[in-house]
Amino acid sequence: MRAAALYPAAGALLLSTLTAAPAGGAPHTAGVSGVALAAARAAATGVAFGKCSDAQDLPGDLQCGKVSVPLDYARPDGRQIELTVSRVRATHRDPHNSKRRVPRQGALVFNPGGPGASGLYFPLVGLMPEWKRIGAAYDLVGYDPRGVGRSAPLSCQKPEDFFKGPSPAPAHPSEAYKRERVARAKKLARGCAERTGSALRHYNSLNNARDLDVLRAALGEERLTFMGASYGTYFGALYATMFPSHVRRMVFDAAVNPDPAKVWYRNNLDQSVAFESRWTDLREWIAANDEVYGLGGTAEAVRLSYERALARLAEKPAGGAVGPGQLQGAFLQAGYYDDLWPSRAEALSAYLKGDPEPLVALASPVREAAAEAENASAVYTAVECNDAPWPTDFRVWDRDNTRLARVAPFETWDNVWANLPCAYWTAPRQRPLDVRTGPGELPPTLILAAERDAAAPYDGALELHRRLSDSVLVTERDAGTHGIAGGPNRCVNGHLDAYLLEGRLPSRRAACVGHAAPAATAPGAKAAAK
C-alpha cells in the first residue's frame, strides 16, 4: 500500500460559486466559548484507547477510542456526538540506527479529505518505510470526522439504492437526461433533510475545524501537529485561521483553493478544467506505450479507442454491471493516481480485443461496500452544500457547464451531477471564512503540491501559500498524483521529514523533480493496482 492510496480517489473532491448572497454574521466566532468548554472537558476526560472493534486481524498496534463533541457549538451543553479516533503509539525506534531511542514529539493527527473520507486506518502507515522515521517520533492519530463511519454517521438514501449501474456518462447530455438528473438531485437533497432532520446544518467545515481543536485537547496536546490532504487542507486552513495559537506544525498536502469566492462552485469548474489536462496526460502515456496496449499511437487515437468502448458499453454493459459511467469512473480514479494507469489501460485494451473480464473486475460496483460508499457520499454532500451558497437555478449550472464541456468534456458533467443536490438544499448555508494569517500569527507551515494535480489544481496551493503567512510551498514538478506526502518522491519526503522531525523548512519555495511515470503492464499480466 502506497501513501497515495490513503487519499480518497472515488467520487472526486468535486469542489465548487457564490452566485447567491452570503449568509450574514461572522461564522468563525460563533460558538467560540462552546469550543473552549468542549476542549476543556475533553482535556479532563482524555481518550480511553483500547482494542478496535474490527482490528483483530490488522497489522501493528492500532488502538481506538471516542471523543465527545457538541453537535452545535453554540449549545455546548446540548446534544453530544462521538468521534471515533485511532492511534498507533510512537515506536521510538530509529529505522537507521536500532540502538538510538527517538524521543516522542507528540501526536500527529491526519485527515485524508473527502469530505467524507475515514482516517481511522491512517496510523498503519507507520509500517511503511517512508513513514517509519515519523512514526518513531509521533503517535500517529486518525479519526472519523463527524458524520463519517463510526462518528454519528449520515445517510441520505438506502445503501442498496446507492449504486445505480450500469449507468450512462454523456459528455454532452440531452435535455431529457438533464431533467432526469435534476429530479434525482432534488430527491437526494430531500433524503438528506428527511433522514437527518435539524441536525443536518451542523455537518460543515467550520465544525470540522472546531472538532479538531477538541480532539487536540483530548489527546493532551497543548498545540496541534496536523496533516491534512485534499479537503483536509481546507478545514485545516480554517483551523489555522481560527486557532493560530493552538498550532505547532501543519502540513497541507494537495491543497484546496480556500478563496471564499471559490468555495465551492467555482472551484468545481476549475477542477473540471484540470481533469481534462490530466486525462490528456494519461492518453499520452498510453499512446507512448502503444506497443503494449494497442490503443493508438497518439492521444487522439487513444481518445477514439476510449469512446469506442463507451459506445459498445452503452449497447451492452460488460458483465451486466459495467456501463459507460463505470468506465468513466475507473478512468477518473486514474486522474488522481498515475500508479493506476497501467491497470486502466490494460483493462481497456483487453475489452476492445474481446476480453471484458479485466474491466468487469476493475469497474464493477462493490455491492458489499455500498453502505460505506453511501455514507461518504452523504457527508460529502452535506458538508459542501452547508459550507457556502450555491446557484439555485439549474439554468446557471447548465449555462456554465455546457460552455465548459466544449473544451473539457471528460469530467465536467459528472462534477455537476455530484454537486447538483446543493442547488436544492434546504438547510441554512454558511458564509465561507476568509482564510488568512498575518506575519507571526501562525508558526511556519508546509504546503505540498503536485503541479498537475487535477483534483486539487495547483492554483489552490499558490492561493493558500499567499494567505498563510510564513508558509513554504514545495512543488513536485510535472507530476499529478493527488497527495504526495510519503509517496515515491524522496525529495518531497525529505522536506516532509525535515519539517515534522526538526521544524526545518526551505527558506523559500522549493521544487522537486517529478517521480517517474509508471511502467506499462502487458495485457494479460496481473495489474499492479486496482
Image (cartoon, rainbow, N blue to C red):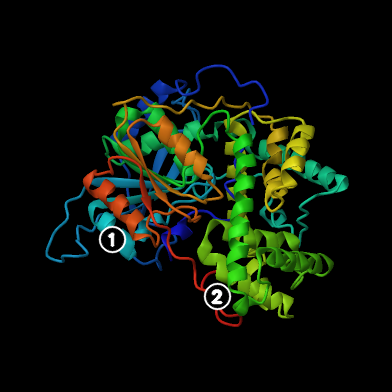
Q: Please identify the residue farthest to the top as the structure is shown.
A: 25
- Residue 227, position as x, y percentages in the image: 38, 45
Q: Amino acid at mark 1?
A: Lys
- Residue at 77 percent across and 70 percent down: it is 320
- Residue at 37 percent across and 57 percent down: it is 486
**Residue sitting nearer the eye, 304 or 504:** 304
- Residue 209 visible in the displayed image: no
The residue carrying pointer 1 sits among few (fewer than 14), some (14 to 19) or many (20 or more) residues within 10 Å by Cα, namely many
Instruction: Name the image quarter holding the N terminus.
Output: bottom left
- Residue 473 visible in the displayed image: yes
Name the disc covering residue 527, or none.
2
Q: Secondary structure at mark 1?
A: helix
What residue is shown with label 1? 132
Instruction: Name the image quarter holding the C terminus.
Output: bottom right
Specify whether 111 is left or right of 454.
Answer: left
Mark 1 or 2 closer to N-term? Answer: 1
**Residue sitting nearer the eye, 147 or 442:** 442
Q: Amino acid at mark 2?
A: Ala
- Residue 448, position as x, y percentages in the image: 40, 47
Name the disc covering residue 321, or none.
none
